[in-house]
């Protein structure tokens, strides 16, 4: 009889046990749509977090708007983010225009010196222009919660909460 025992566990300090991330990653994506005549402007805001103890090197993001039905790229843009200081968050807005209403996937890829670090996607629906009297159609697409600090001997935690918000309608006029 052969018994194989595999164990996994943490053999570090108690500080290492509670650290969920120790990397540069996409924390969240916000998408806002604004009708622009015959097209729609999608403003994509990726939030990039550096949980390392050192500053990151040069970062860039690639944002793609992909039509769900055909899987074709409707719009694409590369944006340099620069570097992010240690233990901090940065964001940049990326405007992209789509011509047709429909279902789209918004994909954001994070690169560090040309190397892919990670990606995140969100799904949006671009509707036909609505009337001025129709209220804005705002959706909560996702929510990201990151523990940033433990206090009182690890009995309490400070958290960073980022909701993903998508406005499908027009901005109400006052």
Image (cartoon, rainbow, N blue to C red):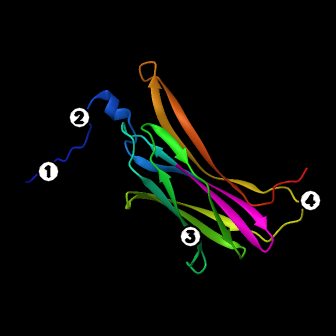
Q: Name which of mark 2 and mark 1 comes first in the sequence.
A: 1
Labels 3 and 4 touching (C-beta < 8 A):
no
Which residue is identified by label 3?
76
Q: CA distance from mark 2 to mark 4?
A: 61 Å
Query: For this rendering, which residue is in front, 57 or 87?
Result: 57
Q: Name which of mark 2 and mark 3 comes first in the sequence.
A: 2
Left or right? Give the position of 52 relative to 76: left
Q: Residues within 10 Å of mark 1 (few under 14, many from 20)?
A: few
Q: CA distance from mark 2 to mark 3?
A: 44 Å
Left or right? Give the position of 53 relative to 65: left
Span shown in magenta: 30-47
Query: For this rendering, which residue is in front, 11 or 99?
Result: 99
Q: Residues within 10 Å of mark 3 (few under 14, many from 20)?
A: some
Foreground mark, 2 or 1, reads: 2
Percent coordinates x, y for residue 120 in the rendering: 50, 58
Q: Name which of mark 1 and mark 3 comes first in the sequence.
A: 1
Percent coordinates x, y for residue 86 in the rendering: 42, 38
Foreground mark, 2 or 4, reads: 4
Q: Main secondary structure of the magenta part?
A: strand
Splitting the image into 4 quarters, where does residue 51 fall? top left
Q: CA distance from mark 4 to mark 1?
A: 68 Å
* Residue for point 25% across, 33% down: 12
Which residue is identified by label 4?
133
* Residue for point 21% across, 44% down: 7
Foreground mark, 2 or 3, reads: 3
Which residue is identified by label 1?
4
Callout 4: helix, strand or loop?
Answer: loop
Which residue is identified by label 2?
11
């Amino acid at each position: 009889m052969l018994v194989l025992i595999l164990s996994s566990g943490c053999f570090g300090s108690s500080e290492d046990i509670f650290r969920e991330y120790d990397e540069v990653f996409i924390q969240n994506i916000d998408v806002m749509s604004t009708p622009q005549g015959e097209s729609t402007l999608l403003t994509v805001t990726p939030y990039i977090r550096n949980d390392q103890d050192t500053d990151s090197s040069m970062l860039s993001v690639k944002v793609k708007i992909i039509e769900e039905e055909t899987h074709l790229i409707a719009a694409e843009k590369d944006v340099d983010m620069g570097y992010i200081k240690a233990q901090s968050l940065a964001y940049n807005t990326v405007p992209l225009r789509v011509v047709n209403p429909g279902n789209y996937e918004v994909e954001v890829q994070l690169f560090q010196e040309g190397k892919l670090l990670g990606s995140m996607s969100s799904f949006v629906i671009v509707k036909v222009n609505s009337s001025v009297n129709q209220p804005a159609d705002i959706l909560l697409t996702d929510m990201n919660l990151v523990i940033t600090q433990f206090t009182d001997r690890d009995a309490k935690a400070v958290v960073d909460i980022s909701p993903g918000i998508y406005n499908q309608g027009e901005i109400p006029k006052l």
